[in-house]
Image: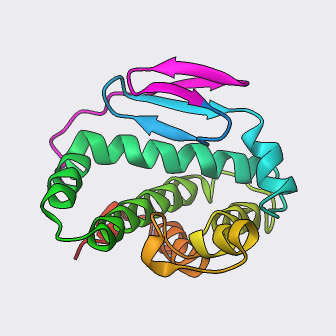
């Protein structure tokens, strides 16, 4: 990854109900997301209730921080050019399944970057013993397999856009254990 780039912080927009960004309107149904044109993370605060109530995560402040760190991971992807490369590859893809597979790789990389963030705080006394499990639990809760089974009653891997629970936990854990963003190359 390029180390000669300067980091520009994203803007975090917390909302309830709906909001506008350069990517258009966002509402609770969209979930947390990153908007590249205005480098904004849009997050409906009620998502955290959804994370625990509907998606089955245990919740907690570290789970919430993971969600934000994952979106910051997308911001980093935007700054280093990964998002542009993936969009071009998706346009050239021969099928929806190929395009979805590229989306999964990008999401898993954002999970790994979130793990790198968590690693950077590991020895700072920020996390209580075993509190990182909140983030791992939230990572698993938002896996495509768990969401599809809960919503549709069946799992359709060809329609995944974020990866399975196991994949998401694996990549978050890789970032957390290594603390090395160069270990987050899901495209290798």
Residue 123: where, in percent of width, then height?
62, 58
Is 172 positioned to the left or the right of 130 in the image?
A: left
Q: Quadrant of residue 183?
A: bottom left
Residue 112, given in percent of the width and then of the height, sits at 45, 64
Q: Is residue 3 magenta?
A: yes
Q: Is residue 172 magenta?
A: no
Q: Is residue 121 left or right of residue 4?
A: right
Q: Residue at x 56, y 29 (%)?
A: 26
Identify the residue at image location x=77%, y=44%. 48
Colouring chosen for the image of the structure = rainbow
Which residue is more in the foreground, 33 or 112? 33
Residue 11 or residue 85, whichever sits in front:
85
Which residue does the image show at 63% across and 65% down from the upper left? Answer: 139
Q: Which range is magenta?
A: 1-26
Can you say which quadrant of the picture contains the N terminus? bottom left
Residue 93 vs 32, above or below: the answer is: below
């Amino acid at each position: 990854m390029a180390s000669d780039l300067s980091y520009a912080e994203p803007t975090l927009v917390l909302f309830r109900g709906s909001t506008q960004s350069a990517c258009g309107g966002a509402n609770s149904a969209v979930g947390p997301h990153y908007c590249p044109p205005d480098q904004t993370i849009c997050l409906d605060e009620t998502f955290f209730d959804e994370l625990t109530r509907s998606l089955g995560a245990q919740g907690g402040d570290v789970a919430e921080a993971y969600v934000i760190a994952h979106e910051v991971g997308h911001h980093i992807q935007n700054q280093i050019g990964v998002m542009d490369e993936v969009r071009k590859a998706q346009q050239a893809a021969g099928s929806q399944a190929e395009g979805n597979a590229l989306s999964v790789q990008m999401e898993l990389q954002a999970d790994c970057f979130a793990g790198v963030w968590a690693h950077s705080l590991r020895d700072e006394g920020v996390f209580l013993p075993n509190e990182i499990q909140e983030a791992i639990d939230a990572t698993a809760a938002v896996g495509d397999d768990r969401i599809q089974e809960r919503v549709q009653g069946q799992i359709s891997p060809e329609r995944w856009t974020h990866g399975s629970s196991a994949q998401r936990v694996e990549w978050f854990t890789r970032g957390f254990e290594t603390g090395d963003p160069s270990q987050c190359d899901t495209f290798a």
